[in-house]
Image (spheres, rainbow, N blue to C red):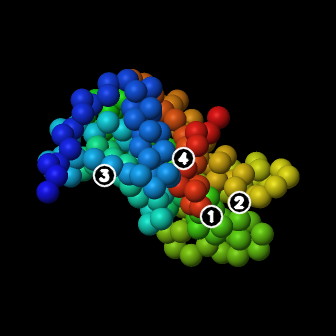
């Protein structure tokens, strides 16, 4: 039986963390994950991932990271609310995490539901109204673009979430990026 992989030093800059995440994603997408450090958790996560609850996008697997490497916050369509923002702030200010990555993905159900609401005007039931209300501005901004409206909406919404976090002085010490996960290839690409 192989000994568990020891934790490498926690990267301390946003660029170093992003490089580690993208290298892990390349291993994952190529079907060669290392499944690092199966032993005790890293003492401090290296990144905050603000992602979707979609079970097809588990950040620890997508970035080939081990137990305790990531602080993962998941909401439908990576919609922001005060609890999510407070959790990001906790990670950045209290834990000293240097990178926040907002991770959207193709074929997002929250985006599809928002587009359906905008097409039909049907009422949105209960608490789902908040989700649609948060994603709808991105859908309206991208409606006239050529190509896949859902893809444009997901990209615009993910970039908007990134920009909201970047603009908040509570997160000033962290680098904030946005990415798109491709369900077919497993590759994460950074959004402009």
**Label 4 sits on residue:** 188
Q: Could you tell me if the residues under marks 1 and 2 are in contact, i.e. CB atoms within 8 Å?
A: yes
Is residue 51 in view from this perspective? no
What is the secondary structure assignment of the residue under circle 4?
Answer: strand
Quadrant of the drawing holding the C terminus = top right
Q: Earlier in the sequence, mark 1 or mark 2?
A: 1
The residue depicted at 48 percent of the width and 65 percent of the height is 56
**Rendered image quadrant of residue 134:** bottom right
175, above or below 59, in the image: above
Residue 169 versus residue 178: which sits nearer the camera?
Answer: 178
The CA distance from mark 3 to mark 4 is: 17 Å
| Disc number for residue 150 | 2
The CA distance from mark 1 to mark 3 is: 26 Å
Viewer-side label of 3, 2: 3
**Drawn side of residue 45 relative to residue 126, left or right:** left
Q: Earlier in the sequence, mark 4 or mark 1?
A: 1
Residue at far front of view: 1
Residue 165 versus residue 107: which sits nearer the camera?
Answer: 107
The residue depicted at 40 percent of the width and 35 percent of the height is 20
The CA distance from mark 4 to mark 2 is: 18 Å
**Label 1 sits on residue:** 107
Viewer-side label of 4, 2: 4
The CA distance from mark 3 to mark 2 is: 32 Å
């Amino acid at each position: 039986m192989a000994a568990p992989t020891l934790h490498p030093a926690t990267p301390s800059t946003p660029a170093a963390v992003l490089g580690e995440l993208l290298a892990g994603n390349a291993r994952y997408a190529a079907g060669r994950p290392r499944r690092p450090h199966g032993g005790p958790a890293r003492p401090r996560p290296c990144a905050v991932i603000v992602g979707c609850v979609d079970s097809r996008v588990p950040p620890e697997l997508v970035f080939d990271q081990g137990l305790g490497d990531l602080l993962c916050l998941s909401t439908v369509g990576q919609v922001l609310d005060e609890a999510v923002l407070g959790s990001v702030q906790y990670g950045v200010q209290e834990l000293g995490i240097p990178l926040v990555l907002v991770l959207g993905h193709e074929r997002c159900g929250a985006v599809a539901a928002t587009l359906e609401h905008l097409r039909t005007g049907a009422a949105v039931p209960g608490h789902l109204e908040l989700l649609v209300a948060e994603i709808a501005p991105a859908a309206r901004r991208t409606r006239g673009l050529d190509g896949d409206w859902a893809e444009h909406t997901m990209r615009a919404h993910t970039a908007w979430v990134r920009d909201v976090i970047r603009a908040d002085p509570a997160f000033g010490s962290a680098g904030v990026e946005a990415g798109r996960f491709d369900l077919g290839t497993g590759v994460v690409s950074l959004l402009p």
